[in-house]
Image: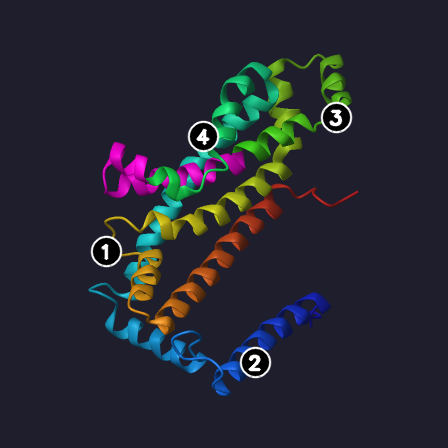
Amino acid sequence: MKKISTEKILTVMTVIAIFMVWYIITATGLFSETIIPSPKSVWESFVDVSRNGYKGHSLLEHLATSMKRLVIAYLLVVVTAVPLGLLSGYNSKVRAVLEPIVEFYRPLPPLAYYTILVLWLGIDESSKLALLYLAGFAPVYIACVSGVIRIREDYINGAKTLGASKRQIFFYVVFPAALPDIFTGLRTALGVEYTTLVAAEMVAATAGMGWLVLDASNYLRSDTVFMGVIIMGITGILLDRIIRFAEKKIIHWKGRS
């Protein structure tokens, strides 16, 4: 029988403690249900939305709509930010072109340029995907550049000494060495995109978990807001676990001496 680690026990105990504190606070009646709904109210909201839906869409439809937007934008980030980041780290001229653009928009709040995206791309899915894409691009790009720059020179010089071409050095030395940083950037990008999801679903959306939370907050339905936030948090953890699983399989040497 596999022994449960101390870390997992501590994690479970932390979750239980949070729910106990939440229950105690609401049971004492110190705060209104509008401010902090009870666990029972949140559960009842979950059951109600699961059975009857919310504003014409089922809970699964809301979740699927958000996941579709998130996954499409995320895949676009992977196929563009990773190669551009690696190339920028490997070639200072490419970095000189791309880095000012990324560094300019990276600190900007998503809502600051979302209105511009809506003006350019319209209020349909294009502007929402563009917002999520821009939110996820910067973390992956920066992580890839950092991963390449941090590679030890003797690795590259050793490959050159053995007669490796630039192409071979890139694919057999630079890329594998940068993989840990790449996956760090991918995990960070997923979190950033998820936090941007609510902003992306603010304009002309009729479905999605971000829109559900935002719409429920307009009507002071705190139980539905808490329910939506918890679901988003759980799905975010699951998506992160998928990336960590892929990282473990691909970078099987990580952490080994």
Name the residue carrying label 4.
Answer: 80
Main SS category, magenta section: helix
User: Which residue is located at x 73 percent, y 45 percent?
Assistant: 255
Sooner in the amino-acid sequence: mark 1 or mark 3:
3
* Residue extending furthest toward the left: 56
Q: Nearer the viewer, residue 38 or 9?
A: 38
Amino acid under label 3?
A: Arg
Q: Quadrant of the N terminus?
A: bottom right
Residue 117, x across and y down, in percent: 31, 36
Q: Nearer the viewer, residue 61 or 32?
A: 32
Q: Are marks 3 and 4 in contact (CB under 8 Å)?
A: no
Q: Quadrant of the C terminus?
A: top right
Q: Residues within 10 Å of mark 4 (few under 14, many from 20)?
A: few
User: Which residue is located at x 40 percent, y 76 percent?
Assistant: 42
Residue 180, x across and y down, in percent: 64, 39
Sooner in the amino-acid sequence: mark 2 or mark 1:
2
Q: Which numbered marker is on residue 152?
A: 3
User: Which residue is located at x 35 percent, y 70 percent?
Assistant: 224
Quote the CA–CA distance across marks 3 and 2: 50 Å
Sooner in the amino-acid sequence: mark 3 or mark 2:
2
Quote the CA–CA distance across marks 3 and 4: 25 Å
- The magenta-colored residue range is 115-140
Q: Which numbered marker is on residue 206?
A: 1
Amino acid under label 4?
A: Thr
Q: Are marks 4 and 2 in contact (CB under 8 Å)?
A: no
Q: Quadrant of residue 142?
A: top right
Name the residue carrying label 2.
Answer: 20
153 drawn magenta = no
Q: Which numbered marker is on residue 252?
A: none
